[in-house]
Amino acid sequence: MSVRCDFCYRECLLAEDQRGVCHIRVNRGGTIITENYGEVVALGLDPIEKKPLFHFYPGSKTLSVALFGCNLFCSFCQNYEISQHEYYHNRTSRVITPEQLVKEAKATNSSISFTYSEPIVWQDYLLDVATLAKEAGLPTILVSSGTFSAASLKRILPFIDAFSIDLKGDEAFYKKYCKASAEAVMKSIMAIAKAGKTLEVTTLLIEGEHTLGDVHALGLLLSDMGVRVWHLSRYHPAYTLTLPATSEAFLHDALAVARRSTIPYIYGGNSRQDQDTYCPVCNALVIARSSGSIHSFLQEGRCSCSQPIYGSFV
Ligand code: SF4
């Protein structure tokens, strides 16, 4: 019997024993299963700023976890060895139950991040962990391409506190570099912003492919969607894409263009750019970040001028 998967926007209709586009979900006897459920391929304690999340408990640690798999095929993927299906059989994994993972996060007093590969394609494991994490009072984070199906976003939203979503470019960019579509990502960003979750969007800037005009257009789009935090990150060659790394000069110019949008918090990533947070009203320094050390000047989430700063703070 054929069954439709609703984990991501592709909504694959799978015949008996057929795999989805992600190669992870497969129809076994009329039920679609996630073949590598619980097989953890990456686990580590990260500074939350690495996600990147600058407005969600700055300076805290997060237990980052990944299973194998992705539903996109980005030619510049930095984690292709745990995302792309041709590497599936090379994986080294160990089974970690949701109970064990939450116990480890509690022991390290950290949040839990679903990250590195594409957690949407192993969202059954994500949801089992996140349900227990919520019962234990632990914050949860999803780092994702944002290519949910409408049903899966609705399912996941109540269990995730903060989202780090990639917006890689426009529709033509997604088609050319990711064999995917921007439309689902845009819809997800809008829905997450509307739901009032902490949301930070990242765009990996590829010089020579993204233009300053693209940055301007994306900035307007994200402003309209209610995005408050935007990271523009420098691309470095990875996987099959061999274009030269994005220069600091181009990122500098792109940041200047991005700041003409109404997005109040804009950061440069993978670079020497200023990483600090400033009050959008009085321009006072409210969070200083340098060489891995974080200092917050916030008082109950507010600047000294009383302006609330976007995000979640201790
Ligand atoms: S997760 Fe996406 S790509 Fe994979 S089977 Fe489901 S709908 Fe298809």
Image: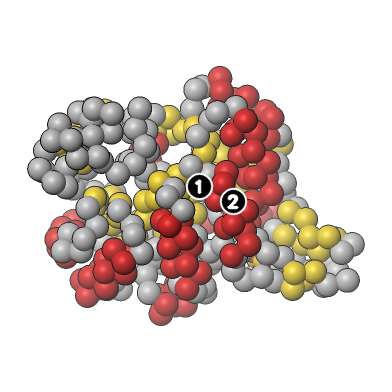
Q: Quadrant of ligand 1?
A: bottom right
Does the rendering let one see residue 63? no
Q: Could you tell me the amino acid type at mark 2?
A: Ile
- Give the SS element for disc 2: helix
Kindly identify the residue that appears in the image at 63 percent across and 24 percent down.
103
Q: Could you tell me the amino acid type at mark 1?
A: Leu
Marks 1 and 2: in contact by CB < 8 Å? yes
**282 horizontally vs 255: left or right:** left
Residue 142 shows which numbered tag?
1
Circle nearer the N terminus (2, 1) = 1
The image position of residue 4, as x and y in percent, is 75, 69
Q: Is residue 171 above or below residue 66?
A: below
- Count of marks, rendered view: 2
Q: Which residue lies furthest to the top in this view?
A: 107
- Circle 2 residue: 156
**65 horizontally vs 206: left or right:** right
Kindly report which numbered mark, 2 or 1, lies closer to the viewer in this rendering.
Answer: 2
The image position of residue 71, as x and y in percent, is 59, 64
Few, some or many C-alpha atoms within 10 Å of disc 1 (few <14, some 14-19, many ≥20)? many
Kindly identify the residue that appears in the image at 28 percent across and 29 percent down.
300
Q: Quadrant of residue 212?
A: bottom left
- Name the foreground residue: 251 vs 48: 48
Q: In which quarter of the image is residue 5?
A: bottom right
Few, some or many C-alpha atoms within 10 Å of disc 2 (few <14, some 14-19, many ≥20)? some
Image quarter in which the C terminus is found: top left
Q: In this view, does 114 lie above or below 104?
A: below
**79 horizontally vs 3: left or right:** left
Residue 250 shows which numbered tag?
none
- Name the foreground residue: 241 vs 268: 268
Q: Residue furthest bottom?
A: 172
Kindly identify the residue that appears in the image at 34 percent across and 41 percent down.
311
